[in-house]
């Protein structure tokens, strides 16, 4: 497990708060009447089936959805009044890997709006990009094209772009999607490291056992919040059935609550019968 | 090589074609990288409709065609935002309808059919001093905007969604880009022609992309290749006595085939050297 429990901080003002929030796209509601809070230093995993509103919830914090009701507050201020300093890492599946950019060019993009009237990046921006690349151990890859990187290195590059503007809140959309075990562990330990450096993190994931079960706090979504809390409390057959609309078994392994799938054998068995 | 330079019309054509080639090469980088190659094709056809309407209404060609092109580009953007309509479909609807307006008006007023041959296929003989001035102004403005907006254009082109989250005014960047593209199409029409313009926008950046992995280098290379193809194409047009549009495009296409062959052979040799080590 990455943390035994969330950090202990002053809990008076939530770091992120959605209040009776209803939103969607083109008039269609995706999240209905959501109220939830995230405290400073939390590391939260958003869980749910495809189309349940995980990415929409992240985009709500970035002001990139149509709001039908309620409001979103970051550090006590409505995002309508002030654009919060948020680092965002999109799903890497959406990246054009043939685009002619190197690692350092991607990282420094995060400084684009720092000095709007300057056509070029400043020395200060370049220094910051160098620092963050060193911190994420990709400085030796600075001149490489993004296609020449491993999965973990690609994730680090886009993480560096999100961090270069010094945000206190980091949003990640499926950061481990399509990764092998080694890359997934590398990414999760890096996020854990950042979380220990006072970074509040909210991420979406489809991987219940490999990712969500290791997080200190999870939120189950399906058009709204079904349940939230530590995985041991939230991963119950009843909550998972409400979230995924399917029967999911729960089991204990070395103190962790994990989900287990019903055994299926697809295709033809050894006797040639179709199962 | 120097003989044609004694003709004033050729010198004018040479200057304009080189500038137009560079312009198309520069703007083409953004179009190719955003997967909008079809918009160059479509917008040039749309502007044709604007050119005919300007002629009929006795409005200055540059003003009428630019406004028409810009409105078409905005209409494409608006149509694309409608759920269920993809960009290629939106371009197809708006620009073909606009082109059809031009063709319909030409068939109605058959008296000026010949005037639009140059607009369709390009003709350096018809380049006036006003055309030269217009190309020069658009070139200076486009280069200035690309330099000033470099980091915004880069971020918006690479990852428009995230650029917006970082406070980049992507809506304004797109609108500004549409305006510049419309202006480039209008001033390029006389040399390249409506039907050839799309290739002049697409081929130089594609060649540049084959040669580099860096965005900055791609911009410099694509601009230089575009200028070179404009220059070479005009010489070919003079000696072959063919419209300038097709010669510029054929020159670019020939260069593309050469560079593609070079990069393919180079990668095969690299692969062969690598595999021969084992």
Image (tube, helix red, strand yellow):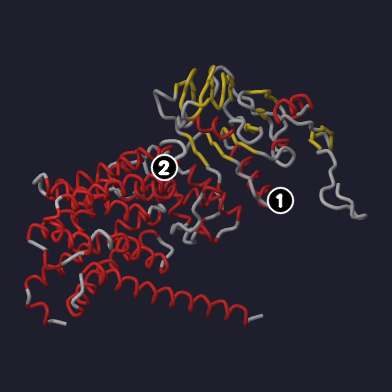
Q: How many marks?
A: 2
- Label number found at residue B14: none
Please tell me how crowded label 2 is: few (under 14), some (14-19), or many (20+) other residues with Cα within 10 Å. Answer: many
Q: Are marks 1 and 2 in contact (CB under 8 Å)?
A: no
The answer to which quarter of the image holds residue B173 is top left
Q: Nearer the viewer, residue B236 or A170?
A: B236
Q: Position of residue A85 (x, y in %)?
A: 45, 33
Instruction: From the viewer's perspective, tell me whether residue A39 is left or right of residue B13.
Output: right
Q: Position of residue A138 (x, y in %)?
A: 54, 55
Say yes or no: labels 1 and 2 on the same chain: no
- The vertical placement of B132 against B100, above or below, is below
Q: Nearer the viewer, residue B204 or A267?
A: A267
Instruction: From the viewer's perspective, tell me whether residue A158 is left or right of residue B125.
Output: right
Q: Residue at x 50, y 39 (%)?
A: A88
Please tell me how crowded label 1 is: few (under 14), some (14-19), or many (20+) other residues with Cα within 10 Å. Answer: few
Element type at mark 1:
helix
- The vertical placement of B113 against A164, above or below, is below
Residue B68 can be seen in this image:
yes
**Subunit bearing disc 1:** A
Q: Residue at x 35, y 54 (%)?
A: B30
**Subunit bearing disc 2:** B
Residue that carries the numbered disc 2 in the rendered image: B163
Instruction: From the viewer's perspective, tell me whether residue B148 is left or right of residue B238.
Output: right
- The vertical placement of A255 against A185, above or below, is above
Q: Nearer the viewer, residue A149 or B61?
A: B61
Q: CA distance from mark 1 to mark 2?
A: 30 Å
Element type at mark 2:
helix
State the residue lying farthest toward the right.
Answer: A271
Residue that carries the numbered disc 1 in the rendered image: A181
Q: Position of residue B225 (x, y in %)?
A: 30, 69
Residue B144 can be seen in this image:
no
């Amino acid at each position: 497990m990455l943390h035994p429990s969330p950090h202990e901080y002053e809990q008076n003002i939530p770091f992120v708060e959605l209040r009776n929030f209803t939103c969607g796209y083109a008039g269609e509601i995706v999240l209905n009447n959501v109220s939830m809070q995230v405290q400073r230093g939390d590391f939260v995993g958003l869980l749910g089936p495809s189309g349940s509103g995980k990415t929409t919830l992240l985009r709500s914090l970035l002001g990139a959805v149509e709001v039908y009701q309620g409001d979103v507050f970051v550090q006590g201020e409505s995002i309508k009044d002030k654009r919060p300093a948020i680092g965002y890492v999109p799903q890497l599946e959406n990246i054009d890997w043939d685009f002619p950019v190197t690692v350092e060019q991607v990282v420094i993009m995060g400084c684009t709006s720092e000095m709007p009237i300057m056509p070029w990046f400043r020395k200060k921006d370049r220094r910051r990009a160098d620092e963050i690349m060193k911190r994420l151990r990709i400085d030796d890859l600075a001149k490489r094209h993004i296609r020449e990187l491993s999965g973990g290195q690609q994730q680090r590059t886009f993480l560096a772009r999100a961090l270069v503007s010094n945000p206190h809140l980091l949003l990640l959309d499926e950061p481990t999607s399509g990764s092998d075990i080694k890359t997934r562990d590398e990414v999760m330990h890096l996020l854990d490291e950042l979380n220990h450096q006072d970074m509040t993190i909210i991420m979406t994931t489809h991987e219940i056992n490999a990712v969500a079960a290791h997080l200190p706090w999870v939120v189950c979504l399906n058009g709204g919040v079904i349940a939230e809390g530590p995985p041991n409390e939230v991963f119950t057959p009843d909550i998972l059935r409400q979230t995924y609309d399917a029967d999911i078994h729960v089991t204990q392994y070395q103190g962790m609550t994990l989900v287990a799938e019903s055994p299926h054998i697809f295709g033809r068995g050894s006797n040639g019968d179709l199962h | 090589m120097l003989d044609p330079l004694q003709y004033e019309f050729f010198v004018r054509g040479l200057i304009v074609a080189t500038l137009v080639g560079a312009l198309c090469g520069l703007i083409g980088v953004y179009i190719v990288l955003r997967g909008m190659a079809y918009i160059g094709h479509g917008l040039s056809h749309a502007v044709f409709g604007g050119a005919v309407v300007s002629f009929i209404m006795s409005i200055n060609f540059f003003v009428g065609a630019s406004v028409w092109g810009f409105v078409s580009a905005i209409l494409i953007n608006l149509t694309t935002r409608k759920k269920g309509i993809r960009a290629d479909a939106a371009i197809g609807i708006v620009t073909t309808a606009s082109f059809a307006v031009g063709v319909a008006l030409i068939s109605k007023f058959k008296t000026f059919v010949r005037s639009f041959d140059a607009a369709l296929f390009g003709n350096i003989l018809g380049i006036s001093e006003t055309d030269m001035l217009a190309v020069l102004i658009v070139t200076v403005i486009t280069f200035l905007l690309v330099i000033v907006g470099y980091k915004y254009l880069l971020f918006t082109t690479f990852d428009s969604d995230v650029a917006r989250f970082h406070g980049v005014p992507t809506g304004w960047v797109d609108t500004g880009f549409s305006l510049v593209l419309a202006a480039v199409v209008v001033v390029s029409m006389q040399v390249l022609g409506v039907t050839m313009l799309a290739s002049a926008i697409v081929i130089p950046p594609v060649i540049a992309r084959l040669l580099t992995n860096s965005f900055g280098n791609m911009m410099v290379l694509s601009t230089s290749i575009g200028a070179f193809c404009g220059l070479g194409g005009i010489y070919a047009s003079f000696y072959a006595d063919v419209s300038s549009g097709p010669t510029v495009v054929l020159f670019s296409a020939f260069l593309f085939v050469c560079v593609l062959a070079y990069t393919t052979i180079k990668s095969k040799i690299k692969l062969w050297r690598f595999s021969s080590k084992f």
